[in-house]
Amino acid sequence: MAGLSGKPRHTSRAPWRQVAAPLAGDRSLRGLAALKRLKPEQREALQRRLEVREYRRAELIYQPGQEARSLYVVLAGVARLSISSPNGRRVLLNLLPAGEIFGHSALVEGGHPHVFEAAAYTDVRAGRIGADEFLEVLAGERAREVGELISFVTERWITLVIRLGRFLAQDLRARVASSLIEAARGFGVQDARGHVLSLRITQDALADLSAGSLRKVNAVLRRFEAEGLIGKEEGRIVLRQLGTLEELVLAS
């Protein structure tokens, strides 16, 4: 039978099997898109070492604060990662399809607890592998050297994601306070006046850091100044009541 172009249609179903097999029948790591970057021998070594378990929908895989020693691979279904804000509200960070790897806290040297909550969004089949074994699969004899670099990058990535997750759960007033506190930690000099920011941070920069419009962020800053929480001296911001700002963030 000819198609619209006049050329005969292919009746072979083999190409469709190549697409459908990873989704339906192929349970090897070869069928998982996110793991196709691995070399075949790496995928085979990873699959041999995975401890596979099934989770029912909404079942916890791990919680924040638990010891992180293993990474996880979603083999089927969808997992979710979330984080709790200071006020206890849970923020959904990501939905992970088959092939995605999570549990990256295990890659931080010296032991690092899980900072996110991982759970089954649908029924999930997941494989678990120890962090050291995972690095051996990827880097072989250079596992230790590669692990040190990955640890450095992962620790900073986790810090940024935590900041983002908490921002998503905060109102603008709390986000501005958080931005001021972080600026004080990085660039603050404490004296009798409070914490003076040694770096000149413009209102535009604060608006960007706080994910708010310039007009609304300026209104928050004026309110903070009227309440005596901050001040300005020679173009620099002074945090006069750092503790009160911290309480404001924790209460949001």
Image (tube, rainbow, N blue to C red):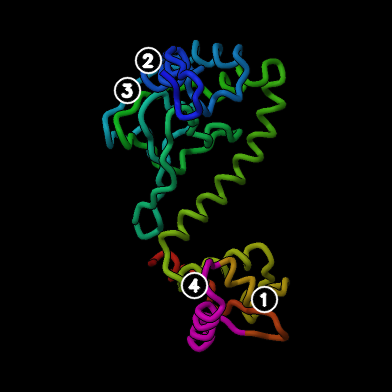
The residue pinned by badge 3 equals 54
Is 184 displayed left or right of 91 in the figure? right
Question: Which residue is pictured at 53% across the width and 16% down the height?
Answer: 46
Q: Can you identify the residue that label 2 sits on?
A: 25
> Is residue 230 positioned above or below 93 on the image?
below
Read off the residue under disc 1.
202
Numbered circle sitting on residue 245: 4
Q: Nearer the viewer, mark 2 or mark 4?
A: 2
Spatial separation of the CA atoms under disc 3 and disc 2: 17 Å
Q: Position of residue 108 (x, y in %)?
A: 59, 35
Q: Of the residues shown, which amino acid type is indicated by label 4?
A: Leu
Q: Amino acid at mark 2?
A: Gly
**Picture layout, residue 47 above or below residue 73:** above
Tell me how far mark 3 sits from mark 1, CA to CA: 51 Å
Residue type at mark 1 is Thr
Q: Nearer the viewer, residue 79 or 104?
A: 79
